[in-house]
Amino acid sequence: MRYRYWCGECGFRTAWLPESDGERQQIEHYAGKHPGTPPGGHVESSRRNPDGGPGCVHLLAVVVLLLLIAAACHR
């Protein structure tokens, strides 16, 4: 599972990361940008892999392939 940590003081957010890496980045952000303020904000979690995956690329490839087949059959 991946997590994204949001700052409770400003618009900062981490990338989608493993829990320990996201937490570390949030702590470093608070130490640098909001010294003396305990880390807050909220955490998003995602069961899918938001860093990668083809997204709609597969769907687009199928559509293009179908169009090519249809154009070839039309001739």
Image (tube, rainbow, N blue to C red):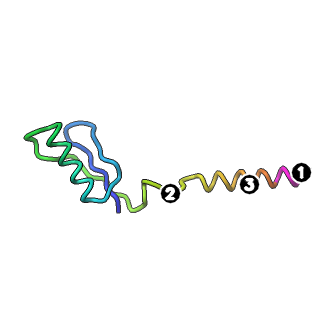
Q: In whole angstroms, how far apart are the C-alphas of marks 1 and 3?
A: 14 Å
Residue at x-position 27% and y-position 40%:
12
Within 10 angstroms of label 3, few (less than 14), some, or many (20 or more) residues? few
Is label 2 or label 1 in front? 2
Q: Magenta span covers which residues? A: 70-74
User: Does the residue at mark 2 contact the one at mark 1 (Cβ under 8 Å)?
Assistant: no
Label 2 element class: loop
Q: Which residue is mark 3?
A: 65
Q: Name the residue type under label 1.
A: His
**Which residue, given by chain and number where applicable, does mark 1 sit on?**
74
- Residue shown at the point (15%, 47%) measured from the top left: 39
Q: Residue at x 63, y 55 (%)?
A: 59
Q: Nearer the observer, disc 1 or disc 3?
A: 3
Label 1: few (<14), some (14–19) or many (≥20) C-alpha neighbours in 10 Å: few
Contact between marks 1 and 3 (CB within 8 A): the answer is no
Sequence-wise first label, 2 or 1: 2
Tell whether position 72 is magenta: yes
SS at badge 3: helix
Badge 2 crowding class, 10 Å Cα cut-off, few under 14, some 14 to 19, many 20 or more, is: few
Q: CA distance from mark 2 to mark 1?
A: 34 Å
Q: Would residue 53 be found to the left or right of residue 46 on screen?
A: right
What kind of residue is marked 3?
Leu
Q: Nearest the camera: 3 or 31?
A: 31
Instruction: Indicate the amino acid at tag 2.
Output: Gly
Predominant SS along the magenta part: helix
**In the rendering, which numbered label is found on residue 53?**
2
Is residue 52 rendered to the left or right of residue 68? left
